[in-house]
Amino acid sequence: MNLKQLAEELGLSPTTVSRALNGYPEVSEATRLRVAEAARHYNYRPNTQAKRLATGRAMAIGHIIPLSTRHEIVNPVFADFIAGAGEVYARAGYDMVLTIVPDSDEERAYREVRSKGNVDGIIVHGPKVHDARLPLLEELGLPFVVHGRSLGADPGYSWVDVNNTRAFERATSFLLDLGHRRIALVNGIETMDFAARRRHGFERALAARGLAADPALMVAGEMTEAQGHDVMRDMLTLPDPPTAVLTASFLSAIGVRRALWERGLRMGRDVSIVTHDDELGYLRNGTDEPIFTATRSSVREAGRRCAAMLLRRIESGAGAPETDLMEATLVVGASTGPAPRRPETID
Amino acid sequence: MNLKQLAEELGLSPTTVSRALNGYPEVSEATRLRVAEAARHYNYRPNTQAKRLATGRAMAIGHIIPLSTRHEIVNPVFADFIAGAGEVYARAGYDMVLTIVPDSDEERAYREVRSKGNVDGIIVHGPKVHDARLPLLEELGLPFVVHGRSLGADPGYSWVDVNNTRAFERATSFLLDLGHRRIALVNGIETMDFAARRRHGFERALAARGLAADPALMVAGEMTEAQGHDVMRDMLTLPDPPTAVLTASFLSAIGVRRALWERGLRMGRDVSIVTHDDELGYLRNGTDEPIFTATRSSVREAGRRCAAMLLRRIESGAGAPETDLMEATLVVGASTGPAPRRPETID
DNA sequence: GTTGGCATCCAAACCGCTTTGAATGATCGG
DNA sequence: CCGATCATTCAAAGCGGTTTGGATGCCAAC
């Protein structure tokens, strides 16, 4: 059933039916009701493609997911982010269009999306430091919102981000307050903006106490369980091993925990762990008391906010860039405790 | 730049340009080259909406992601599946359209997708036992492929699935061969088809040795780290605790491992663990030697196969349903060993 | 020298909707 | 009672492609 048929059925012109259904004022209340009734009865739904062509609005948002060609790993955060954003789109009547792109030809993908005109805007995932995509998108003139930021990029873009620097600065201070001095950082790949900022926060907190970060205690890599484990296993063989670890991901923290257990060390007593917790649906940090002390920030909520911001920009026609800096909360769990007194330091 | 402008620029009719670009034979090789050259030069890309309207093909595949309203949890497997499917779509020039739907009004979502006509086919995620969506989709006449199967549904549909029954049957036999008799099953929610089948495989293997499953050792629930932990913690307080555990997810296995460690038990010596491993990018089962003995099957590969199957069906006009049963491999890792001899059983 | 076939190209219709511009009849103020 | 105003409706022209049904010109065949 299409518009013309429905109009025919009603003895009206397509014009009137269209207007009645889209809430235009120049239609009598009586016919509007009649039309609505008929539409329901025939289960009429306007053809999306036709509507899009006619209005010039795709009513869809694109998410371009970079897929590292080397690592072949999808960001575990992605599913929750999508769930949050999807909620918002669904309510607003937008579709969500995903494109998985090997990071080798991301530029082509963006250009194509632009000229194909099948989305009204884009969410940029996983921004890197000095991310080349932002100037490109600016040039393309496609509305976009970045999930995260890009150090060194021209700041004239809209974004939603967690205050990663502050979060890791606080987490580090927290460990310092507990007496820890040998603190390790198990970070994500530091070409990623979020990881660079976390490291920065880590170093800043140390510097504030006149301490320098020990390069031997700072590692960056793919944030997996295996990474956490291998890194911690190696660090524990150092002559002066860390008494605390700060990890950028829940999975890394789990790996660190495994390495501790293997060595017969108790988490929170022998070695403390603080992790970042994205509050992923399938990776909850304990049910009541948190398993890990963590800097907590919901990725799902970030997804909602990104989506809402983008829709706002699209519907109001851009304007000055919007930004939204979410503060992470520091929740204390069972994985941290005072720094163990080393035998030789007993005063 | 649109078709008409490009045609103008070339001094040709839109008809000819369209044909040249789409490889129709009634165009001289000379003009075809000229058109291709100009298209490249002006970076022309046909407008998606217009093309869709004209051809009646959406060139897009829908993924309807059910979101349990109670659990608010996105299946962790989802990101990898999407990555696999996305690869295939990208190569074939299809878009991937995601819809996140609270499972309360899934039916409405399917009907809407159908009548809006913005996808050519659908991938069904997370089928349940007796899943009501399958007859609905059949009725709607929209091509679809199910990732998984549905026990009790009319079998006239296309699917890609892992042989869950067989995988868990083998895993259970493996544990039985090692001498284990008290084997626990930490399963997913058993209204989900895959979980029902895994349980079935588990029970079948026990039955084959004349053993009955102990209800106290079978738990079903959300497959999270916390679930694994809590369930195992409780089981360890039983008068006759399990010596081996079979878990339906890597995350549950990690939780089980935590519970063991908390009790000072060694994995693979005091208690064995076998888990199912979906080979998720961010949840690798160890780098060289597997951490856990596991039934392994790549979800990403399943994504690729589902996508390819659906495209095949769309482009060849349905036909008899296709099915693809993937066998999981049983990989032996460090988490299993012979059943410990109980003190009183020393002969 | 026609005629038929073939290779090329084009005008126009169409896909299903929105939207502009105009028509119609009813209502109202003077 | 008449012109102006208003409410309501419609025909037709897009949106940007594809596709149908000719045109045109050229060449081989008769």
Image: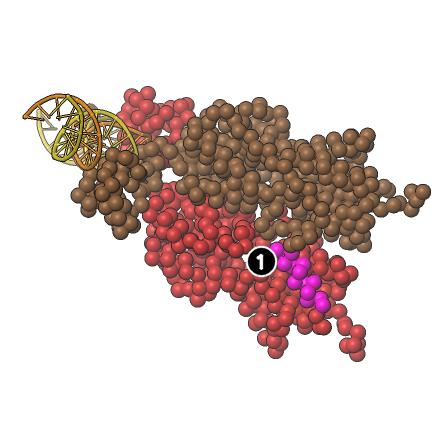
Chain colours: A brown, B red, C yellow, D orange
Q: In x, y percent, where is residue B125? A: 47, 54
Who's the residue at 42% across and 40% down the image? Answer: A92
Q: In x, y percent, where is residue B203? A: 58, 71
Which image quadrant is residue B32 in?
A: top left
On-image quarter of the N terminus of chain B: top left
Callout 1: helix, strand or loop?
Answer: loop
Q: Specify the segment rendered in magenta.
A: B224-237
Who's the residue at 62% across and 63% down the image? Answer: B186
Q: What residue type is disc 1 on? A: Glu
Q: Is residue A22 above or below residue A258?
A: above
**Is B268 in front, or is D23?**
B268
Left or right of A110? Residue B202 is right
Residue labelled with disc 1: B222
**Is B236 in front, or is B40?**
B236
Check if residue B236 falls in the magenta segment.
Answer: yes
Q: In x, y percent, where is residue A243? A: 81, 44
Q: Is residue A219 above or below residue C1?
A: below
The secondary structure making up most of the magenta span is helix
Left or right of B57? Residue A252 is right
Asked whether the viewer can see residue A105, the reply is no
Asked whether the viewer can see residue A308, the reply is yes
Q: In x, y percent, where is residue A224? A: 66, 46
Which image quadrant is residue B257 in?
A: bottom right
Dot 1: few (<14), some (14–19), or many (≥20) neighbours within 10 Å? some
